[in-house]
Amino acid sequence: MRLTKFTDLALRAVMRLAVCDQDGSVTTREVAEDMGVPTTHMAKAVSRLQHLGVLEARRGRGGGLGLTRLGRQASVGWLVRELEGESEVVDCEGDSPCPLRGACRLRRALRDAQEAFYATLDPLTVADLVTSPTGPVLVGLVGRRPE
Ligand code: SF4
């Protein structure tokens, strides 16, 4: 099982915001820089997270990104499911659809395995992801940024 880059970026963004968004002035560019990814890519992940109600953008002077209450309490399993959408482990329907796709035991087994993967993430919350040792590393990354 491999997550899309998009899902990984979104998870990095929520972890980043889970440690340091109290003053609500963190920008998308700063989140991207702290997490070592292009701002344009991070902007797409941030937009999707806003749509899901996981984070909000506060407007005006000193405005920025912050996690919502849902974002802090969200199940990682739920979040990954939402970000991954309907994607399957194997692309049975792509440009050259597999002739077995309508009656394939392997496909069923892979769907079950995918669900088991998500289920292991269900008990974890976003807040859990930034307990030690991850949280202190994130705080260090943020503190390294020049004023
Ligand atoms: S063999 Fe089954 S799992 Fe593999 S591509 Fe075909 S339908 Fe999908």
Image (cartoon, grey):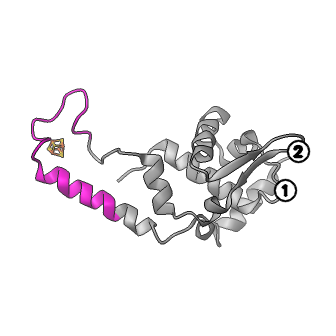
Q: Is residue 131 left or right of residue 1?
A: right
Image location (x, y in percent) of residue 146: 86, 46
Q: Is ligand 1 within 8 Å of the beta carbon of the residue shown at mark 2?
A: no
Quadrant of the drawing holding the N terminus: bottom left
- Residue at 18%, 50% in the rendered image: 107
Q: Is residue 116 visible?
A: yes
130 sits left or right of 115 in the view: right
Going by the numbered disc 2, the residue's amino acid type is: Gly
- The answer to which quarter of the image holds residue 63 is top right
- Measured along the vertical axis of the image, is residue 63 above or below residue 18? above
Q: Which mark is residue 62?
A: 2
Which residue is rendered at x = 62% and y = 61% of the image?
70
Image location (x, y in percent) of residue 110:
23, 55
- Of callouts 2 and 1, the N-terminal one: 1
Report which residue position mark 1 lands on.
23
Specify whether residue 34 is in view.
Answer: no
Q: Is residue 110 magenta?
A: yes
